[in-house]
Image (cartoon, rainbow, N blue to C red):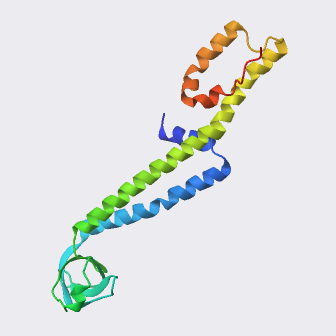
């Protein structure tokens, strides 16, 4: 089954409100994915640099300062990963990994953050689709199965024998057996309790 048919089957079984919630959740998962891509880009495209002058750190917050990049360019902005002692001790010429408007004290921190963000996005997407798939089979797909089986019961009642004939029943069960395995107990419940 292709991805397009799988997605169409998933959406067809969801109620309109559930479809809106699914789209909102998937769009929300794009935010950590964007940060993961940004950190990966910075890990590849950044440069080794050193601070110029003193850095200024807030207590329990980030540090800010300036640095010199290769080629004579100057960068300035927030520096992640520097301890508050860098400000208290008036340290200078600190090694950084930086771009024009960002810097980190440890380059590997970019890669670790990107890995966590990619993993969180993947798990969140899998959980969202799993919940949507279960809701799809619990509402739309179950209703479709019931609609397909109701004509057999209706014809059986018109004949007065409580269901389809023996040969028709065996043929119907053979044709619908694969679908019964995929829908499970939800499709089996459509038959209800046989009349005695």
Whole-percent x and y of residue 170? 64, 11
Residue lying at 21% horizontally and 72% vertically, measured from the top left: 106
Count every numbered label the image shows and give the total: 0
User: Residue placed farthest to the top in the image?
Assistant: 167
Whole-percent x and y of residue 59? 33, 86
Against 33, residue 158 (above or below) is above
User: Residue placed farthest to the front in the image?
Assistant: 196
Residue lying at 72% horizontally and 29% vertically, measured from the top left: 147
Whole-percent x and y of residue 194? 73, 18
Between 88 and 11, the one nearer to me in the picture: 88
Which quadrant would the C terminus be assigned to in this image?
top right
Left or right, 99 with reference to 21: left
Q: Quadrant of residue 109?
A: bottom left
Whole-percent x and y of residue 50? 17, 83
Between 100 and 194, the one nearer to me in the picture: 194
Q: Quadrant of residue 67?
A: bottom left
């Amino acid at each position: 089954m292709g991805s397009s048919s799988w997605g169409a089957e998933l959406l067809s079984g969801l109620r309109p409100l559930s479809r809106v919630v699914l789209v909102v959740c998937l769009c929300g998962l794009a935010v950590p994915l964007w940060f993961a891509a940004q950190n990966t880009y910075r890990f590849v495209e950044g440069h080794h640099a050193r601070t110029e002058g003193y850095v200024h750190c807030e207590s329990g917050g980030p540090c800010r300062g300036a640095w010199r990049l290769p080629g004579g360019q100057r960068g300035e902005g927030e520096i992640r990963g520097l301890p508050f002692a860098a400000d208290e001790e008036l340290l200078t010429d600190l090694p950084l990994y930086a771009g024009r408007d960002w810097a980190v004290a440890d380059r590997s921190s970019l890669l670790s953050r990107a890995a966590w963000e990619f993993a969180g996005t993947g798990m969140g997407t899998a959980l969202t689709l799993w919940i949507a798939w279960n809701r799809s089979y619990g509402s739309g797909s179950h209703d479709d199965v019931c609609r397909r089986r109701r004509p057999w019961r209706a014809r059986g009642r018109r004949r007065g024998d409580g269901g389809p004939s023996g040969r028709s029943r065996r043929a119907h069960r053979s044709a619908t057996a694969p679908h019964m395995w995929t829908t499970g107990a939800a499709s089996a419940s459509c038959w209800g309790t046989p009349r005695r």
